[in-house]
Image: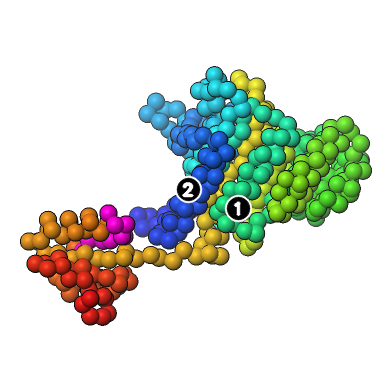
């Protein structure tokens, strides 16, 4: 029999000391940045009914952790925060004035493919703007996302923007089955040019197939719009292209310091998103640290016809990057206070006095002064206060002061 009492499940991990501090600091910075922009915090349950995600079909069964409640109903650990917040908005906030700005910091749980090294516990800070469509709201959320990364001093970061309407306009013109269309989407998302070309060659040749074959390679700055202009003359394609181009130029005008790239291969969750989609990247981090987009039809599933746009920042990815580039050094207590049992009342009073002065102090639980000194030396604590008849201050490694 195998025993797993000394291991964490695949896709999870322990977080220690400075990494915890870096994560908490990153979380506080992001949330404070959102609070100052009028976003109000909400939290949804870690457990939700399976129907919330299964009926909407935005997440596969295989990607969700399932459990059963006392009544035999199937529950899941939330794989996403936006869908529960859509439920919350539609059921609890109907009478709020719109637009509603909501923010959160909570964990999503998704079963990562085996041996991929990905986390199944995904700590996220995010924001949702509900009840406002159009370019003005898109611009606000993109700039808010950039400001959150900037506030964390996570730089240099890059924003990549796309528009799901471009892909939808082309895929709707393609003569292919539903399964083939989904496979094409996945290959474009993965930028697997070879497999994509092979799949499209098996389908009837058409302007749509040729355009889809080019999508993964349409990536860069403003010149990409010129390259994409002749992909399709359909009204839906041209409208999405124009919307994306206008957004790109508005971002550059509003915040020239942001590095923005256009990626026509951003086609993730095509049934979920309806308009602009975007991601944020940091150098050397092998995954997006930020992702978001417009989802104008999601709240319809809950009986609320409101447009919405949101984003989520991957907390551990940002904190991990900051630890690599701007490492947080362990900060030992400024002082250790030791006293004997007979001096407990006086020792606690002195410790309280030091803390009132703003000093980071720790009480010693050692049985002797020698043990207290050894502990202080091991922890890198420079000062030891010995509370006896007199209070003695000792510089560890030196003479009494």
210 sits left or right of 300 in the view: right
The quadrant of the image that shows the C terminus is bottom left
SS type, badge 1: helix
Residue 154's quadrant in the figure?
A: bottom right
Residue farthest to the left, as pictured: 342
Residue 113 in view (yes/no): no
**In percent of the image, x 60 and y 25: which residue is there?**
98
Residue 293's quadrant in the figure?
A: top right
247 sits left or right of 292 in the view: right
In this rendering, the answer to whether 150 lies above or below 334 is above
| Residue 268 percent across, percent down from the top left | 69, 43
Instruction: Give the spatial CA distance, label 1 vs label 2.
Output: 14 Å
Which one is nearer the viewer's eye here, 276 or 118? 276
| Residue 94 percent across, percent down from the top left | 55, 20
Part of the protein shown in magenta = 356-364
Q: How crowded is mark 1: few (under 14 residues within 10 Å), some or many (20 or more)?
A: some
Whether the magenta-drawn stretch holds residue 358 is answered as: yes
**Residue identifier under label 1:** 150
Q: Earlier in the sequence, mark 1 or mark 2?
A: 2
Q: How many labels does the image show?
A: 2
**In percent of the image, x 76 and y 48: which residue is there?**
252
Q: How crowded is mark 2: few (under 14 residues within 10 Å), some or many (20 or more)?
A: some
391 sits left or right of 100 in the view: left
**Residue identifier under label 2:** 28
**In percent of the image, x 25 and y 59: which residue is there?**
354
The quadrant of the image that shows the N terminus is bottom left
């Amino acid at each position: 029999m195998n025993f797993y009492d000394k291991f964490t499940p695949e896709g999870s991990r322990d977080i220690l000391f400075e990494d915890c501090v870096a994560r908490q600091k990153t979380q506080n910075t992001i949330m404070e940045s959102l609070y100052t922009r009028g976003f109000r915090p909400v939290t949804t349950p870690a457990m939700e009914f399976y129907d919330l995600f299964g009926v909407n079909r935005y997440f596969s069964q295989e990607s969700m952790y399932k459990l059963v409640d006392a009544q035999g109903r199937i529950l899941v650990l939330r794989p996403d925060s936006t869908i529960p917040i859509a439920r919350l908005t539609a059921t609890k906030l109907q009478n709020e004035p719109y637009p509603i700005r909501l923010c959160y910091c909570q964990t999503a749980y998704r079963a990562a493919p085996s041996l991929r090294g990905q986390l199944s516990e995904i700590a996220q800070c995010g924001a949702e703007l509900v009840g406002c469509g159009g370019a003005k709201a898109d611009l606000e959320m993109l700039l808010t996302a950039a400001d959150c990364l900037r506030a964390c001093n996570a730089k240099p970061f890059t924003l990549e923007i796309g528009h799901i309407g471009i892909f939808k306009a082309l895929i709707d013109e393609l003569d292919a089955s539903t399964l083939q269309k989904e496979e094409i989407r996945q290959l474009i998302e993965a930028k697997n040019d070879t497999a994509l070309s092979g799949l499209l060659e098996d389908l009837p040749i058409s302007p749509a197939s040729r355009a889809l074959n080019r999508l993964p390679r349409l990536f860069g700055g403003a010149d990409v719009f010129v390259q994409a202009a002749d992909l399709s003359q359909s009204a839906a394609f041209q409208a999405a292209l124009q919307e994306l181009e206008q957004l790109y130029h508005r971002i550059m005008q509003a915040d020239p310091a942001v590095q923005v790239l256009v990626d026509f291969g951003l086609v993730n969750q095509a049934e979920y998103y309806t308009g602009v989609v975007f991601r944020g990247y940091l150098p050397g981090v092998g995954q997006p640290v930020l992702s978001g987009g417009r989802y104008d039809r999601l709240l319809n599933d809950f009986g609320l016809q409101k447009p919405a746009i949101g984003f989520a920042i991957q907390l551990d990815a940002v904190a991990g990057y900051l630890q690599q580039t701007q490492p947080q050094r362990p900060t030992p207590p400024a002082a250790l206070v030791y006293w004997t049992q007979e001096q407990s009342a006086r020792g606690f009073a002195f410790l309280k006095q030091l803390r009132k002065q703003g000093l980071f102090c720790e009480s010693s639980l050692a049985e002797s002064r020698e043990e207290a000194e050894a502990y202080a030396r091991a922890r890198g604590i420079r000062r030891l206060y010995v509370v006896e008849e007199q209070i003695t201050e000792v510089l560890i490694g030196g003479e009494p002061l």
